[in-house]
Amino acid sequence: MSWINFKNYQETAIDELHDKVNALIKKEASKICVFKSPTGSGKTLMMAEWMMRFCDPYSRTDGKTFSFVWIAVNKLHDQSHDSLKKFYELKGMGLRCSYFHELEDRKIKQNEILFLNWASINNEDKIIVRANERDNNLSTIIDRTKDSGRTIILIIDESHNTAQAENSKAIIKNLDPKITIEVSATPEISDFDERVIVDIEDVRNEEMIKKEIVVNPGFKNYIVDTKKNDQTADELILRSALQKRIELKKKLEKEGSGVNPLLLIQLPDKKKGVPDKREEVEALLAKFGYTTKNKKLAVYLTEKDNKVNLLNIEKNENEVEVMIFKQAIALGWDCPRATILVLFREWKDETMTFSIQTLGRIMRMPEQKHYKDQELNIAYLYTSLQDINTRILKGASSGIKPLTSYRSEKYKNIDLVSYHGKRFREETRLSSDFVAIFVKAAEKTSLKNVSIKGGVVNTKMIKDGRVENADKEITKFESGTFSMPKTETELQYAFDMFVLDNLDPFAPETRSIKRINDSIYTFFGARRKEDEWPKIQATILSSEKNRQAVIDTINLAKDLYKTEVGKGKKELILNDEPWNVPEAINFDPSFVEQNYKKSIMQPYYARSRDGETGRLFEDSEIENDFIKYLEKAKQVVWWFRNGKQDGSYLAVPHTEHGQEKPFYVDFVVMMKNGTVGLFDTKSGYTAELAKSRSDGLIKYITEQKKKNLDGGTVRYEKKSWLYFTDKEYKYNPKDIKGWKFLDLN
């Protein structure tokens, strides 16, 4: 780190932070100040300079003295510790940078910074937290520091990542700092007393960051050879990115710069049942001459022994040209020579801020100046994702939003009896019996009308897109997309992912995916004709109608399968505690928020059926329709969409093939008169299979005499909602005899 001459925007931010925190110090109670500054703006060094000026005894007139606690995620506290320590050493003055074990006299001294990470203080087993014989823990240290008359200031680095989590809030409360400063490029907090904002345009004008990000440059006039089709989309973007890196290296040499531009490759998370993307990417890189052995490739993964060639990789002249990673570098990793990002990762709603942080890694200028050649002042993003800009924009407005739904405070316990059963392996995984069951199920769905004609399944890609302001405020320019037909390898992967999305509640493993694949091929008479599989896959994936037919058949086959497995002795167990609606439920990133006001869980999340169409679903259309009915029903106070295969959800007993099993009713509904309704929605072939569950539900409702219960199997017929309440279930699609009208208005 050479000596730093702060930029104009940095001096302005430091002065503003100084004035606003000083004003907060004078007020009663604890206060919060947000410091929002873009990635690449020098947040850490601005904080270092601010702390030094803030503690300067010659400029203070109130006689106050300060101790600091600096908390960050993962190893970021180490990076911050080293940066600040080096900064103060070069300046020849400043604050003392310490770790927990370096503290003297069990307190934080005047003008001393204690560096911690969240993991060390979120774990009660850590010596930092737990009580011990020496009375040397964080609580004691904080108390002794305050007793010495010093004011504690807490700095939360990359605060968007953890500061708003409930356990983090509890820790902050226990520390009870006078001032908390939340530092982030994308802060999440909305309840604060003051804030200091560094405008990204000011950072760009001072030549600290690149002017913009271009997406898939050079693809505007790319011509796809549909006949040849021997290059995957991934291979195309990787080849193009590697070529761009070579071009940039030559341009830097012409500018007299020794910077060796680094290409980053972000891998998707490994999913059970589908091939690991890392193996495919490393094979492609080796094909192009980049390996860990020749030192051109570095690996930065969280798994054990998966960190290779990382020594001094942040140095501008380092020999590594490509680095693959997952999440590890998104926060705090500082390597200004990184200028190209290849994105394979599937960005999800709850990781949008993380994704923006990742973009920030390629926005820094390696020599803190813009070059004459404008192509060197641009960051480059290559991706096979078709809607990267839209996703960035969505994340920019929402930030990190963990997909957690919370029970409304108006809820009062209903204390229902619930059961669970011991599970057989066959009930969590598909056996070879599934193939015959699927074929039988297909004769009852529209799949029997599907003929194999093939089709084109494309990968849509951005062509020559642009992104400005890869931070909270984002401007996008996009020239459109182009399509590449999927290769057989890509088609197989897409088909496996399609099956994987429809496996629930069975375990997402390779064998279960293969069972469903085999079932589909068998139905079309091609179980042993591997050369026909791509045509079958294309027929299904290229048509929304055909996709739906397969989904319907899979769902029916799963229901039939569950009735025919686990026929041996099985124990049904009564839960120890009465059942109530869960206080909180976590959801997969594929779920999206829906505006249902009467749902007892808020926000309500529904699962996205198809990333391309954006349509939503529960498990069936009738469930969606029933929710809409409940929302409008005047007698309904709240409703709960019950889950499946989990002890936290309500299960009632029913008998299949002589064996008692738990049955998870679809909806729990609270009425204005205090009645609790238990409703299970059925239609078509699912209504035909509902006898054992309907009989079990009615028996359960009858036996719970002390509870004010109502309900039954629900169907929609002739523009009316009907429910069955008799002991012996009967269903005739042409007859509603025995069914009652369900009127909740």
Image: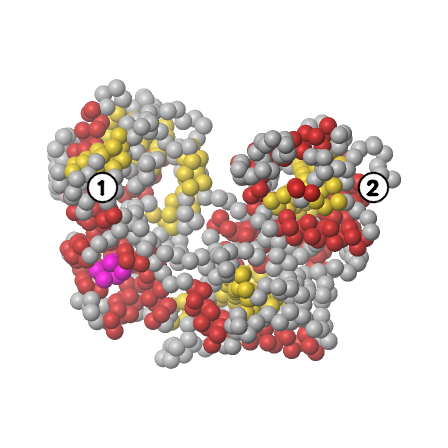
Marks 2/1: CA distance? Answer: 72 Å
Precedes in sequence: disc 2 or disc 1:
2
Element type at mark 1 = loop
Pick whichever, 100 or 197, lies toward us: 100
- In this rendered view, identify the residue nearer to me: 53 or 708: 53
Reading the image, the residue beneath label 2 is 56
Q: Which percent across, then down, holds residue 615?
A: 37, 52
* Mark 1 neighbour class, 10 Å CA radius: few under 14, some 14 to 19, many 20 or more: many
Residue at the farthest top position: 706
Q: Position of residue 31 (x, y in %)?
A: 68, 33
Q: Quadrant of the C terminus?
A: top left
- Which residue is drawn at the image coordinates 83% and 32% (left, top)? 63
Q: Residue placed at 75% from the left, 45% from the top?
A: 96
Q: Could you say where residue 197 lies in the image, as x and y percent from the top left?
A: 69, 47
Q: Do the residues labelled 2 and 1 touch (CB within 8 Å)?
A: no
For the record, the magenta segment spans 514-519
Q: Name the residue under label 1.
A: 682
- The answer, for residue 685, to whether it is visible in the render is no
Q: In which quarter of the image is residue 653?
A: top left
Crowd band around label 2 with a 10 angstrom C-alpha radius: few (<14), some (14–19), many (20+): few
> Tag 2's secondary structure?
loop
Question: Which kind of residue does numbered mark 1 sit on?
Answer: Lys
Q: In this view, does 64 lie to the left or right of 598?
A: right
